[in-house]
Image (tube, rainbow, N blue to C red):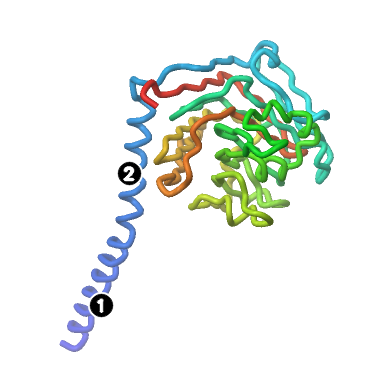
Amino acid sequence: MHHKSFFLLLVLATSLLALIQCKMLNPVIEKKVRDSKEFSTLNKAADWTLAFADNCTTDWQENWTLDGLIATVENNKEGMHFTAGPEYKNDAHHAVLWTKQSFMGDIKIEYDYTRTDVENKCVNILYVQATGIGEAPYDKDIFQWKALRQVPTMRKYFDNMNALHISYAAFTNGSDSSGYIRARRYPAAPNNFRDSTKIEPSYEYEGQPYFKTGEIYHITVIKTNQQFFFQLEGKEGTKLFTWDLSNIKPVTEGRIGLRHMYTRSAIYKKFKIYHRANF
C-alpha cells in the first residue's frame, strides 16, 4: 500500500506540474495564434493599393538614391545587388539605399532577399517611413540634407530621423550561431540609443541563422499605428515577428530605406510597397 500511495502521489504531482506548465505556455501560444491571424487578415486585405513596384532588374537609379560613396549597386536578371564597402569599422563603408518616393499611412512592404556575403558580424536594416526631425539642418525631407550623409554614420540616422527600424540578417559580432531581429523607433534620446529606441521584444536565436547565404527569402513587413509585423518565408518554413506599437509615438509618413553595414551585401528583387486607401 505504501508503494501504491507513493505512486499515486507521484502521478498526481506530475499531472499537476504538466497542468501548470500548460497554463504558463497557453498565453504564449495564444498570442502567436492571434498574431498570425491578424497578420494574415491584414496581408490579404482588399484595401491595399500598390504604390511602388520595382522588379530590381533595370537601372536602380530610376527608383532609388544612395547614401555612401563606396558602396556599389548593380542590376541584372537576378535582381539588385547592393554591396557595402569591405572595410569593417570604417563608417565610410556603410551604405543606405532610399526610395525616391515617400509613403503615408499604413503600409505593406514585400520583397525577395538573398544574402550574398558570408560575414558573421554586423546587420542589415530596413528603415520604414523615415523623415528628418525638422530641426536645422535636419529638414523633414531627408533629401534636403543628403550631402551630410555621404559618410553614412549610423548616428546621423538614429539621432536625426523619425523612423521605424528593423534589424535583420543580424549577427552577434563574431558568431555564426547567434543573432537577432529587433525593432526600433527613432530618434534616440541623447547618448542612449540602445535603450531609448528599442521596441520589445527582441528576437534572439541560437543555432542556425534566420538568413543563410545564397538562399532566397520572401520578406513581408506590415506597419499600422497599432502593430508592426516582419515575416520571412524560406525553404525551411515561415517565421513571423511582431511588435506592439500602441504605446509608441506613431510614424506616419516617409521614405523606405535599406541599410547595409560595412562588409554586408545582398540581392533584392520584386520590391513592392502598398498603402491602405483608408489611412
Q: Residue at the location (48% across, 30% down)?
A: 220
Q: Quadrant of residue 156?
A: top right
Image location of residue 53, percent across then percent down: 54, 15
Residue 159 lies, with reference to residue 16, above or below; the image says above
Q: Residue at the location (58% across, 46% down)?
A: 208
Q: Circle 1 — which element?
A: helix
Q: In this view, does 74 lie to the left or right of 11?
A: right
Image location of residue 44, percent across then percent down: 35, 25
Q: Residue at the location (56% across, 46% down)?
A: 184
Q: 190 or 101: nearer the eye?
A: 190
| Residue holding disc 1 | 10
| Residue holding disc 2 | 33
Q: In this view, does 190 lie to the left or right of 151?
A: left
In the picture, the disc for residue 210 is none
Please state, as top left, top right, bottom left or bottom right, where the N terminus lies in the image.
Answer: bottom left
Image location of residue 264, percent across then percent down: 73, 36
Identify the amino acid type marked 2.
Answer: Val
Q: Residue at the location (76% across, 36% down)?
A: 152
Q: In this view, does 246 lie to the left or right of 132?
A: left
Q: Residue furthest left?
A: 1
Q: In which quarter of the image is residue 6?
A: bottom left
